[in-house]
Image (spheres, helix red, strand yellow):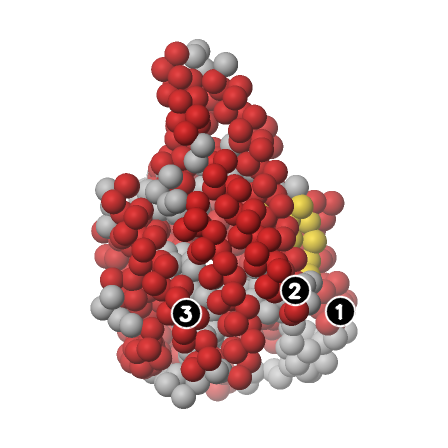
Amino acid sequence: MSFAKLDDHCRALGALDHALSILGTDEAVNMAPGGGEARAEAMATLSGMYHRQATDPRVREWIETAARSEDLAPEQVIAVSELERSYINMTCLPSDFVESKMRTSMRSEQLWRKARPTGDWAAFQPALEGVVTLMREEAAMRAEVLGLEPYDALMEQYDPGNRTASITPVFAELKAFLVEFLPRALAVQEARLSTRPLKPLSGDYPVERQKALGLEMMTAVGFDMNHGSLSVSDHPFCGGVPSDVRMTTRYRIDEFLPALMGILHETGHGLYEQNLPKDWSHWPSGKARGMSLHESQSLFVEKQIGRNPAFWRFALPLVDQFLNESWTMEDLLPHVHQVKRGKIRVDADEVTYPLHVILRYELEQDLLSGRLEVKDLPEAWDAKMQASLGISTLDDPKNGPMQDVHWPSGAFGYFPSYTLGAVMAAQQWAAILKLNPDVDAQISVGDFEMVNAWRRDNIWSRASTGSTPEILRDATGEDLNPARFIAHLQARYGQ
């Protein structure tokens, strides 16, 4: 039977994907710098093997026969349909191009790690130019096959169903609101601090204590430590596979909230991966839908839960226990809710973070179209930073266009997911609050079962059985809507 052949095919691809995921995680966390060239070659070869198997012409025949001639159960119909979508996207690119892209992007990423600490833009620029050239080629190939605009064709790889036609107006509304709202939020904060100044952090937070606190928080919100781990990397991420989720963060010993919030963020990703339907884990339909839904899960844990005062009624005693502190809610919440203009996206607060993402969304479209060349990126970045956040990065490329790993690694079309995720998380929280007005009381005593059950039923178990807009609509009863996120920011930071 063709469906059985497709099942075997997906299992074989799953094994290769497993190997690539673990190798990629190890490269970022454990690998010695001298292993970079050999690792790039190994992963390029495996990527080529994966691509050749995934695009085997027999797969199209099996898909057509299974869909046309076999009596499939409803979930099998969905699985075959999603595999067909994946197959079409995979066959947009020849295998030699996939290998070349993997090799180029890995070497670019390795150079980025070397050049970023000193902000050596001159050394990094040629590598990024090579990546941008490849991404323009990839976008053109995908666009021709998929019948999409080039940027939409790249975004389809991360967010199936989302298009710039619907995202750009949402981002424009959000950007206009945030540019006006940021000074107001800062003024509210300043007035509050004038009557009760910010209590200084002790500045004594050994990494081992921070990690112990992070592991405690991960377990509390539902992460299964039997199928996951926490390590350190230059750039926090969640990798691995659902049965072996590899999470990372980075620590500073003079403050603890950045690492803890990073851990909560990555735990949201990990919860999504661990709760995907196991019976379909080797099929595309059983995998996470896309990065905006993935980010909605991480931001739900980090923002809707982790910056919720109710959460800190539960978490504050643990902070005191693990970090030898003695805090009150009035001491800690101003740190948790602090709004501050800054250069670094991953350190940004809820109010300023979307402005960092929208900047990248606009710039990478300009890079892809040729309206902007890599050599002019520092100036373009600086202009947009000054317009939206009032900050210059012109003489600081390390904290400007070199700060993120995404472009060096060829992940164009990914950045919108972060702010789309924040918007979606706010919509999901509103849906939960409507069903269960007592959710804050549950969270305040460390009870996360209801919020996890809702997400398991409406997001996690859906995996990739619908498009991103379809899953959001089914879960919340509405399309992408910035109003929920705007209301959330106004309530938390505007009064």
- Marks 3, 1: nearer the viewer: 3
Residue 25: % across, % down: 62, 56
- The answer to the question of whether label 3 and label 2 lie on touching residues, with beta carbons closer than 8 A, is no
Residue labelled with disc 2: 35
Query: Gap between marks 1 and 2, in whole Å?
Result: 31 Å
- The answer to the question of whether label 3 and label 1 lie on touching residues, with beta carbons closer than 8 A, is no
Q: Kindly identify the residue that appears in the image at 52 percent across and 72 percent down.
A: 111
Residue 6: % across, % down: 50, 25
Q: Earlier in the sequence, mark 3 or mark 1?
A: 3
Relative to 105, does residue 468 appear above or below in the rendering? above
Residue 232: % across, % down: 66, 65
What amino acid does circle 2 point to?
A: Gly
Q: Nearer the viewer, residue 233 or 310?
A: 233
Q: Is residue 194 left or right of residue 388?
A: right
Q: How many marks?
A: 3
Q: Is residue 319 left or right of residue 468?
A: right
Q: Earlier in the sequence, mark 3 or mark 2?
A: 2
Q: Tell me the tag on residue 278.
A: none
Q: Tell me the tag on residue 209.
A: 1
Residue 436: % across, % down: 50, 42
Relative to 123, does residue 37 appear above or below in the rendering? above
- The answer to the question of whether label 1 and label 2 lie on touching residues, with beta carbons closer than 8 A, is no
What amino acid does circle 3 point to?
A: Leu
